[in-house]
């Protein structure tokens, strides 16, 4: 990562700095309630921001700003944060809060269970400090049952069913997004939140379809996958079970206007919350997203704005990898399904005192070309 000036953030002048300050205040409240010494994540090469103590002065300054003007809010960021450019091409996808038809009782067309977390499913950290899920088998910690085994009935009779769906494809999309809204026959909504996974490797269904020569790489998106599975019910389960990963849920309390809770512990905000790889970008850090290129329909897209690292995902791996939360509803689902864009990513690192960062005054990048530093080919 290379330090850059705020002038390197395309569109920074036109951001809603007051709204951004409000999000920092919410994050500071969350950080204050974390266990003392809890690591926030982030690359080891970053000078600050990986520990709670690195945010103390920033949060105190944010709390002191009551009724601040847009200019003062902007000055807060430029004083208390140092932007760092990730020196490789960033890749962005999108996710959303899906809604599917469901019933709280099994019957009729509702035959696919949504499972809560099994009591013997545990989580811990491996020697690298990474979170792992599994259970003890003959004194050895192993991944839990894979998707095919669970589909075969290994969890039946344990009272784990939260609800019943019409299709295993609906379940897949709930699990891929990590949260969801169940629309019951009487019109009521039940909200689901992520409650762990089985510890098996995640294999994208699109990759399975391409490897089996059932779909071309350029044709893969959320809608095309759903359409293929609907057209080929005789092959659908074989394709679905090629992904051994399985996500468990819990019922949550929220309103229809609220997003699900992300891994950082805050409700996700549409177009402001970003899922990241915690090994490189720590929770809470502001992240400047800069996209320029063609979308899935070949249309030219430019999109630049501040987001916040508030979530993670099993397929979100690597520096410069971001998954943008887009909200709920048909429009969010459509945008999320189409979003596969390259660009740049800048991480704003909190500083222990105002102005101590290495900020190039001319806005150029130290030690890298300003025109696409570290870009790689598709």
Image (tube, helix red, strand yellow):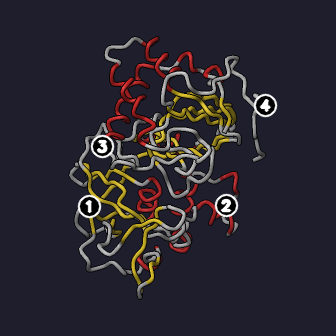
Left or right side of 245 for 3? right
Q: Secondary structure at mark 3?
A: loop
Nearer to the camera, 131 or 297: 131
Tag shown at residue 33: 3
* Residue 297 shows in this picture: no
Q: Secondary structure at mark 1?
A: strand
- Residue 121 spot, x, y in % from top left: 36, 72
Q: Quadrant of residue 6?
A: top right
Q: Which residue is mark 2?
A: 215
User: Of discs 3 and 2, which sits in the foreground?
Assistant: 3
Q: Which residue is mark 4?
A: 369
User: Of discs 3 and 1, which sits in the foreground?
Assistant: 3
Q: Earlier in the sequence, mark 3 or mark 1?
A: 3
Q: Earlier in the sequence, mark 3 or mark 4?
A: 3
Sort mark 3 into few (<14), some (14-19) or many (20+) by Cα contacts within 10 Å: few
Tag shown at residue 168: none
- Work out which quarter of the rendered image holds the N terminus and state it: top right
């Amino acid at each position: 990562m290379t330090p850059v000036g705020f002038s390197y953030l395309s569109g920074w002048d036109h951001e809603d700095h007051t709204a951004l300050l409000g999000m920092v205040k919410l994050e500071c409240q969350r950080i204050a309630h974390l266990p003392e010494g809890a690591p926030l994540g982030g690359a080891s090469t970053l000078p600050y921001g990986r520990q709670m103590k690195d945010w103390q002065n920033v949060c105190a300054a944010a709390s002191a700003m009551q009724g601040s003007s847009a200019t003062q809010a902007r000055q807060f960021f430029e004083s208390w944060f140092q932007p760092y450019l990730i020196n490789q091409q960033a890749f962005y996808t999108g996710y959303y809060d899906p809604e599917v038809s469901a019933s709280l009782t099994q019957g009729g067309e509702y035959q696919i269970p949504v499972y809560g977390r099994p009591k013997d499913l545990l989580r811990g950290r491996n020697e690298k400090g990474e979170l792992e899920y599994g259970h003890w088998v003959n004194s050895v910690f192993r991944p839990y049952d894979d998707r095919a085994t669970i589909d075969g009935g290994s969890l039946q009779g344990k009272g784990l069913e939260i609800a019943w769906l019409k299709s295993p494809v609906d379940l897949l999309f709930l699990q891929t997004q990590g949260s969801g809204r169940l629309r019951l026959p009487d019109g009521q909504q039940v909200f689901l939140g992520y409650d762990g996974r089985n510890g098996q490797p995640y294999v994208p269904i699109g990759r399975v379809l391409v490897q089996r020569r059932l779909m071309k790489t350029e044709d893969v998106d959320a809608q095309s996958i759903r359409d293929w599975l609907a057209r080929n019910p005789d092959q659908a389960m074989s394709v679905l079970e090629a992904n051994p990963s399985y996500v468990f849920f819990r019922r949550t309390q929220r309103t229809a206007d609220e997003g699900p809770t992300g891994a950082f512990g805050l409700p996700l905000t549409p177009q402001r919350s970003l899922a990241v790889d915690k090994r490189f970008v720590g929770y809470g850090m502001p992240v400047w997203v800069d996209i320029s290129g063609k979308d899935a329909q070949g249309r030219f897209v430019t999109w630049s704005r501040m987001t916040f690292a508030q979530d993670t995902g099993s397929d979100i791996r690597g520096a410069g990898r971001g998954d943008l939360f887009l909200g709920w509803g048909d429009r969010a689902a459509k945008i999320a399904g189409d979003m596969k864009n390259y660009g740049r990513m800048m991480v704003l690192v909190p500083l222990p005192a105002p102005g101590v960062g290495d900020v190039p005054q001319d806005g150029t990048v130290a030690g890298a070309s300003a025109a696409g530093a570290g870009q790689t080919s598709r």
